[in-house]
Amino acid sequence: MTQFAADRLLLFGATGDLSRRKLLPSLCALDADGLLPEGLNIIGTARSDLDDAGFRDMAREALEAHLEPDRRGGMAGFLNRLSYQRLDASTVEGFDDLATKVGDYSSKGLAIFLSTAPSLFGPTIAGLRHAGLTGEKVRMCLEKPLGTDLDTSAVINDAVADAFPEERIFRIDHYLGKETVQNLLALRFANILFEPIWNSNYIEHVQITVAETVGLEGRVSFYDDAGALRDMVQNHMLQLLSLVAMEPPTSFDATAVRDEKVKVLRAMRPVLANETVTGQYRAGAINGQAVPGYDDELGKPSNTETFTAIKAHVDNWRWKGVPFYLRTGKRLPERVTEILVQFRCVPHSIFGGTSGAGLQPNSLLIGIQPEENITLSLMAKVPGLEATGNALREVPLEITMPDAFVGQYRRIAYERLLLDLIKGDQTLFVRRDEVEAQWEWVDAIREVWEEEGMTPKTYTAGSWGPSAAIALAERDGVSWHE
């Protein structure tokens, strides 16, 4: 595939929440760092009745609200890159005016970021084709949700594929734009000490936790149709799992990296009923503040899960017999995304009696949010003289990313992804066969829930989910990292 740096970026949903909080601040920060191509024009489009000046005013307010002051350097120059065209994407009328606003992109190219309701994907693609905005120098970026199961996902992907080949389709999972997620690849494949022990001979289990303290937060209709399994597990958590479990790619390019991720997803064993737990929060307290239950926020009873815990397996040579414990939920005690790699105990301890009483297996904790850090726990001798021998204690070796790289900004995940979209690098974007493998595994879990008549168990907001989730791990002798 020939890459080209686009000189035009078209943002659908440009007046929406995602654009205000993430897209415009990310683009402004990139511009302040001199990373945007010179002459890149950014065209926003949405239903809002604005002109260029009105869109720039809206963008200025968004930047002042969501971007740190020291990252707004040259904001006036960035705002001058912006223009706007009102559009109702549900009909082809208006797309010709949009094409006029975009102008001639044939010399360098056009990147399109599509952040709209899934029901508008088909009409939008039809409108773009009608207006001549689907040519060889156009690439399409899709923001989730991309369907609610494999079949609906295929409908969306088919509609997009009808106008764009796979090498020009960029599916976003914003977790892949996070520095620590990318650093997982560097940790594994740029350091020789980990790869020889990164297998079932040395690793006992892996835990992946994505915990949120928030509730519905204005996503009432979307979330009740989706639930924790579709909202978090199908995309973010399975992407994290595949990065942990993948084989070393032949190179760091889009095809090689994504080929190895797909192999992991296709090797995942179907989940049994006793390997999954669902929950739904009830009224409780978060950080000392009373919060309502899910049914209270929704205003009606619902069987949608706000929590799920899963014991997963990757049935291949490297990981056979190693459980991957996945846990995600809303209204949990703290906001945290982390990966814990738990190594096995030493095969024989030479520290007998009371000396070896503190012996613990090594673990590697990769913090993704809110703190980006890597902690390797090692055993060490406690300084001093002991009558009974050497006293042992667990000692953490920590790499805190902001401390390790002084002077580096903590970037918004979308910065990396938008820059790669403009440049045409698909490495950190999700390929269609990845999406379909994820949906196949998740759809099978939902079938198990339906066949077994499983409904969410209640848990108090501010707790770590239903007690059954604790039992899911503890019956294997495993405790969740908290």
Image (cartoon, rainbow, N blue to C red):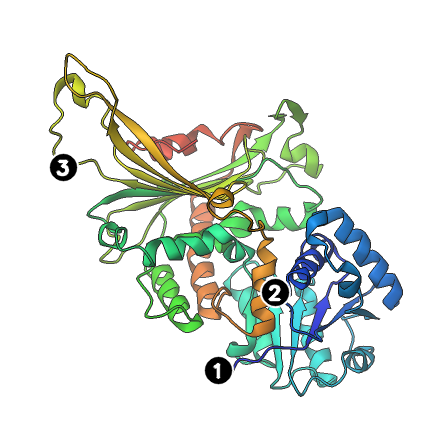
User: Disc 1 and disc 3: Cα gap in Å?
Assistant: 49 Å
SS for dot 2? helix
Which residue is rendered at x = 58% and y = 29% of the image?
Answer: 461
Labels 3 & 2 near each other (Cβ < 8 A): no
The reply to whether residue 183 is visible in this rendering is: yes
Say which label, 3 or 2, has the lower sequence index. Answer: 3
Which residue is rendered at x = 71% and y = 59% of the image?
Answer: 24
Left/right of residue 245 with respect to residue 218 in the rendered view: left
Three-letter amino acid code at the position of disc 1: Met
Which residue is rendered at x = 27% and y = 37% of the image?
Answer: 362
* Residue 252, horizontal then vertical, whole percent: 40, 68
Which residue is rendered at x = 35% and y = 65% of the image?
Answer: 260
Three-letter amino acid code at the position of disc 2: Leu
Tell me how many marks there are.
Answer: 3
* Residue 147, horizontal then vertical, whole percent: 58, 61
User: Disc 3 and disc 2: Cα gap in Å?
Assistant: 47 Å
Nearest the viewer among 258 and 389 is 389
In this figure, which residue is indicated by the disc labeled 1? 1
In this figure, which residue is indicated by the disc labeled 3? 347
